[in-house]
Each structure stands twice: as structure tokens, then as C-alpha cells.
Amino acid sequence: MITIKNSHELFHTLHQLSRKLTNKLNEALKPFGLFSAQWSVIFVLKTKGSLTQKELCEYLFVEAPPMTRTIQRLVKQGFVKQVQGKDKREKHIQLTEAALNDFPKWERAVFETNQTLLNGLPETSQVELLNLQTSWLKVL
């Protein structure tokens, strides 16, 4: 059984790791004028297709106000557009042609950063970490 001290250390190191990974990703995306929060939205829209803001919030575990700011920034940059849904209040967010054209460059930069960050971590540990994270997300 995990002790209180170990519990604090576990979550403290998770937060440290999360910040470090976010900072590294931000560095990789900076030349493209993007941040990790924007990349998250772009990546989800590319893999899942058009989604509502509410669906994006739920999927990425982000509150509505920061998601609104991220989407507004992406609209200004010409990377996403809002399309009216069946319900007048519902707007679907989707990638623009500009974003689809630039996506391979962004993805390459993210992939190269990820590879660098994973350097030194054996592949078996990478698979185990992915499985642990996936199963933990399912129970939260």
C-alpha cells in the first residue's frame, strides 16, 4: 500500500513531468506560432474530425473559458473555423485547409520532440507507461 508521503511524491513528480513535457512541446511548436494547448485541439480535430467546443472540452479535460481562448486564437491564425450545427447554439470546430496543409510540419516537429524525450527510456517501459496511463484514465 502506498503511504501518504509516497502519494504526495507520486503526484508531485507527475505534475513536474507534465510541466516539463509541456514546456518542451511549446519550444518545438514556437517556430510555427503554436502552443501545446493549440496543438492538442488541432491533433484531436485531425484524428476525430469536426467536434463541438463542449466535446473538445470533455475530451481534453479543459474548462470552457481557456478552450474558448484557444479556439479564438486558432480562428485568428486561420487554422480552425466554426461551422453552424443543426441547433443554432451549436457550433462545430473544424480544421481549415491551411491547417491541413501545415499539419505534417507540426506533426513532424512534435514527433521529433517526443522521440528525443523518450530517448533512454526502453521500449518496454514506454509500452508499460502507455498501458498504465490508458488504464488510469479509464477509471478517473
Image (cartoon, rainbow, N blue to C red):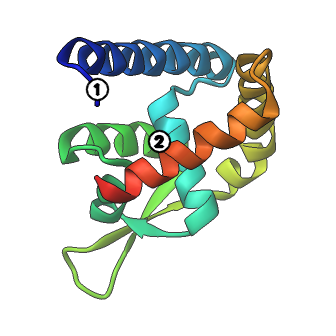
Q: Is residue 84 above or below residue 98?
A: below
What secondary structure is found at the residue carrying circle 1? loop
Upstream in sequence: badge 2 or badge 1: 1
In the image, residue 12 lies at what x, y percent?
A: 32, 14
In the picture, measured across the screen, residue 135 lies left or right of residue 122, that is left
Amino acid type, label 1: Ile
Q: Is residue 76 above or below residue 31?
A: below
Residue drawn at point x = 40 percent, y = 14 percent: 13
Q: Nearer the viewer, residue 60 or 67?
A: 60
According to the picture, the residue beneath numbered tag 2 turns out to be: 74
In the image, residue 24 lies at what x, y percent?
A: 60, 14
The disc at residue 2 is: 1
What secondary structure is found at the residue carrying circle 2? helix
Q: Residue furthest bottom?
A: 86
Label 2 CA crowd tier, 10 Å (few <14, some 14–19, many 20+)? many
Label 1 CA crowd tier, 10 Å (few <14, some 14–19, many 20+)? few
Residue drawn at point x = 47 percent, y = 41 percent: 74
Amino acid type, label 2: Leu
In the image, residue 139 lies at what x, y percent?
A: 32, 57
Q: Residue furthest front?
A: 1
Q: Nearer the viewer, residue 72 or 18?
A: 18
**Residue 31: quadrant of the picture:** top right
